[in-house]
Amino acid sequence: MHGIYLDCQDAPYKTNLLFKFLEGMSSAGFRYLFFNPGRFFPWSEDFHFSSFYTYPEEFMQKFAEKAAQKGIVLIPVLDAGSGSGFIVEKLFYRFMAPEYPEKAAIDPDTAGTVLFFEELMEDLFSVIPEAGYLLVLTSRSLPAESEIRFLSRIIKTAEALGKKIIFTEGGGGCLNDIPGAAGSLCEGIQEPGRSILKLENSEIIIRRIPGVDPFTPFSGWKSLWDKSSEREFVTDRELLESFINNKKNCWELYSTLEAEISLLIYGSARGSVLKAFDIYRRLEECYGKTSAIRNRIESVFSSSFEGQYVENLCLSIMEPLESIANRAKEKIRILERRSL
């Protein structure tokens, strides 16, 4: 038996693809599915941490029903660690992460935090009543005592609902330390995409495709069971990596250009007009390449995600790049006039 961890907390896959995902899992013999919908779940607290898109309750219910029909154990994920940025980024809930923004890790010892996550847990089970288990993620930096106290209370609340809790090992607590836990998920160190689920005296391999900032192409999930899609995933991944790397290069070139122009303005002997012009030429080339890749990104990935996610993502990356490209152009024009 094997399982898959599907992370949708940052990128909402199209609902029809998620149904295809269940089909693929079933045909390949995967039995367990950890599903993390993150900010896109229809939370009852949505008026506080809303997103541009929310999976409808009807979809979540049908998704759970379809999984049960396929013999797949659907395990929703509740992130109470450092992956709940969509919660603590809101002022209303900032109290749960005392070190925000340096660290987004949630401190469960803060008054009201446990009650808040108990309510989220009830949300999940009310929308997905078929789920018998819930995976609760905690911060790796959390002291063992805090993790045990937090999980022990969550476990009692789950038991009252007739449900069971699985948690992640690797931080402070181990399975033997937390009475009442149904199991644990131990993340692999040597293999980042492979975890071990300890459940009901069994050890089950859980696969997870490493993400490419800012999302995992759907072809990556298909490659877990469809060998013909492996090459497609490699191509998609390279396209995404190229986009992100070019974005970083643009910012680095702009920063270097700013430093060089500052040397020239203050009359430093270390400043070079020719070097500034060369850096600007490379920035122009990098910006042009990034714009071209952006068009390919939108063409390839837009149909896989809900709510114009890819288009908005590309826009959020390209608008600042356009701004620095224009600022660099103006500064080079000034430099050209002074150099004549």
Image (spheres, rainbow, N blue to C red):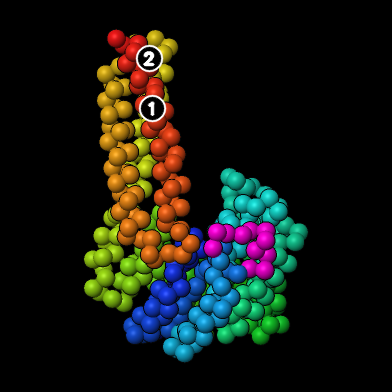
The picture places residue 256, in percent across and down from the top left corner, at 37, 28
Left or right, 155 with respect to 339, comes to: right
Q: Quadrant of residue 303?
A: bottom left
Q: Position of residue 85 (x, y in %)?
A: 57, 55
Q: Where's the C terminus, which quadrant? A: top left
Q: What residue span does the magenta drawing correspond to?
A: 43-53
Residue on which disc 2 sits: 264
Q: CA distance from mark 1 to mark 2?
A: 14 Å
Residue 50 shown in magenta: yes
Q: In this picture, is 336 found above or below 150? A: above
Residue 26 shows in this picture: yes
Q: Say what amino acid the circle numbered 1 marks.
A: Ala
The answer to whether residue 166 of the structure is visible from this angle is no
Residue shown at the point (38%, 14%) measured from the top left = 264
Horizontal side of 242 relative to 167 (left or right) equals left
> How dense is the environment of label 2, judged by Cα within 10 Å: few (below 14), some, or many (20 and up)?
some
* In the image, farthest residue toward the right: 111
**Amino acid marked by disc 2:** Leu
Q: Nearer the viewer, residue 224 or 49?
A: 49
State the count of labels: 2
Q: Secondary structure at mark 2?
A: helix
Q: Provide residue 318's location: percent of width, then percent of height.
A: 41, 43
**From the viewer's perspective, is 117 left or right of 132?**
right
Pick whichever of labels 1 and 2 is earlier in the sequence.
Answer: 2
The residue under label 1 is: 328
Residue depicted at x 48% and y 62%: 307
Which residue is painted at 42% across and 54% down in the image?
311
On screen, 165 above or below 190? below
**Disc 1, disc 2: CB below 8 Å?**
no
Question: Left or right: 314 with respect to 225?
Answer: right
Q: Main secondary structure of the magenta part?
A: loop
Q: Quadrant of the N terminus?
A: bottom left
